[in-house]
Image: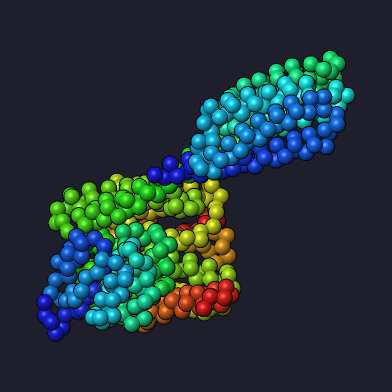
Amino acid sequence: VDPVNALRVVVADDHPIWRSGVRADLGDAFDVVAEAADAREAVAMITEHQPDVVLCDLHMPEGGGIRVARECGETTAVVILTVSEAERDLLDAIAAGARGYLLKSTGAADLRVALAKAALGEPVFSPSLAALVLSEFRRMKKLDSPTEGLSEREREVLQYVARGLSYKEIGEELFISAKTVENHTRNILNKLHLSRKQELMRYALEHGIE
Amino acid sequence: MGMVHDRLAFDRGMARGIAAFRWAALLWAWIGLILERDQLDHRWLAIAALSVATAVTAAATARAARDAASSFAPWLVVLEVTVGMGLLLLDGVVYDPARQQSLPWAWPAAGIITAAVVWGTRGGLVAAAMAAVASFVGESILRDAVEWSVSAASKSALFALAAIAAGTVAARLREAEGEISTVRAREEVARTLHDGVLQTLAVIQRRSDDRELCDLARSQERDLRTFLFGRERAATDLAAAVRASVDLVARRDGIDVQVALADDLPQLPHASVRALAGAVQEAVTNAAKHSGAAHVVVYAEPTSDERGVFCSVRDDGHGFDLAAAGEGEGLRGSIRGRIADAGGRVEIDSRPGRGTEVRLWIQ
């Protein structure tokens, strides 16, 4: 591990075999500064080590990836690991502040690329996640949620992601740079995160929770 | 564990309900006895009979409070039915024949209900028949033939109804309870497999260089996931149909297909669902056979008016020049044909080196 340039990672998963496997797969470009077996421990390790990126299982004791995303997502890039894409929990973790998710079957090379991108602030999107996020914004619009919806351009970008285009391909379709496409996806996640926060706050106010 | 818990909850609910009924019936009998004390021929016999019923009621209630299942002990049910028969027999003895209303007809119904809960509708009907015989004999002791038979017949009909109602309700509740525990067991299995086997299959895919082993793990994972999450996924029949079509091709042709479906797809007519699933299957097959693609993405979302569905099947293969090569039989016949028959619209977009996208709109 090159201690100067390596990206600093916290790996959180309640299965030790996973943590050791991920550690092996990450190779020299990453420095695993800490491991955690549950959400509480993960939050403590992230606070202590301030890593560049966190790789964190969706289902863990003590609150799972959702808790880690909620408590650390604003300051640290949290990437959720999951075995299944078709879960509502996944969307909740993203809305709570996670930067994206990876399937556990993702190969080592793809894992490294995605983690490096996430550490640099790029959302880790997939078609399934884009489809879920689009559904969520339609739902919010129907409920007359006071939070800001997607702009037409953002909706367009997200639909392209859902149809399987890369940021580069989307940029070419829309005559914008891949960087701009990435900015749009980042804004979309921020809007989702903000609206979820406002929803929670409004719920708390309406129900008198302090 | 789950089964035991549910069984207890069922018994507790039933025992509590019957106990309340017993006390209400008993109260009714005592009030009747007190109000009509002057018309009683054998006052002390009536008080003694109702006291026995009170003792049985108290005993059953105490057992139900301690352990619900024990209040359904067979000997207790037999005792309750027997005491009920005794009350019905004595009814004719203790009362003045001029009086129409008989005192304890409601309380014996509790025994019949309990018998129906424990032994089913048939058991309840046997108890009801015994109670009916007791009331005919009891009524016949002092009354005129016509009068007693009408009164006893109406009581018997009520007893039979109570037995049938209680037996049916108990059977339904047991059925529901069985279904709940099946669902719980399934969830438990899902959680266990999710945490263990699915994780292991994913580890194999990530860490093995053996191509065949990875393929095996992938297909096992897909089967297991369909089994575990199949029901949730079939939220709308359209989503289920599209996933089934895609799974078929992915398995057959060994191609990696990502299915990204909105979770708010509208309900479409059956013919449209069939047409769309068939067209998607054909489009994915085309991609697998002819495009040289490594990945295919199938995406579907509601159209902006929410009455129809937009669906895209996109591959990262070599693409083709539509003007030069034409669409080919698969695209023209199977996809355009199916969708046109269902009143939908098809667009095919392909450029050499840029993959192919089939776009479908249907209502």
Residue B175 point in image, percent of width and height: 52, 37
Residue placed most toward the observer, B336 or B6:
B6
Q: Is residue B337 left or right of residue B33?
A: left
- Residue A68, located in which quarter of the rendered image? bottom left
B317 is higher (above) or lower (below) than B139? below
Q: In this view, does B354 lie to the left or right of B117?
A: left
Q: How many marks?
A: 0
Residue B178 point in image, percent of width and height: 48, 39
Residue B276 seen from this side: no
Residue placed most toward the observer, A69 or B63:
B63
Q: Residue at x 14, y 85 (%)?
A: A4
Q: In this view, does A190 lie to the left or right of B120?
A: left
For the view shown, which residue lies furthest in the bottom direction?
A: A4
Q: Which residue is drawn at 57% across and 73% down?
A: A207
Residue placed most toward the observer, B22 or B55:
B55
Residue placed most toward the observer, B196 or B358:
B196
Q: Residue at x 73, y 31 (%)?
A: B47
For the view shown, which residue lies furthest in the front direction?
A: B44
- Quarter of the image with the C terminus of chain B is bottom right
- Quarter of the image with the N terminus of chain B is top left
Colour scheme shown: rainbow
Residue B75 point in image, percent of width and height: 53, 27
Q: Which residue is drawn at 22% across and 48% down?
A: B216
B1 is higher (above) or lower (below) than B324? above
Residue A110 point in image, percent of width and height: 23, 67
Residue B69 seen from this side: yes
For the view shown, which residue lies furthest in the right direction?
A: B98
B15 is higher (above) or lower (below) than A111? above
Q: Is residue B296 left or right of residue B121?
A: left
- Residue B37, located in which quarter of the rendered image? top right
- Residue A156, located in which quarter of the rendered image? bottom left
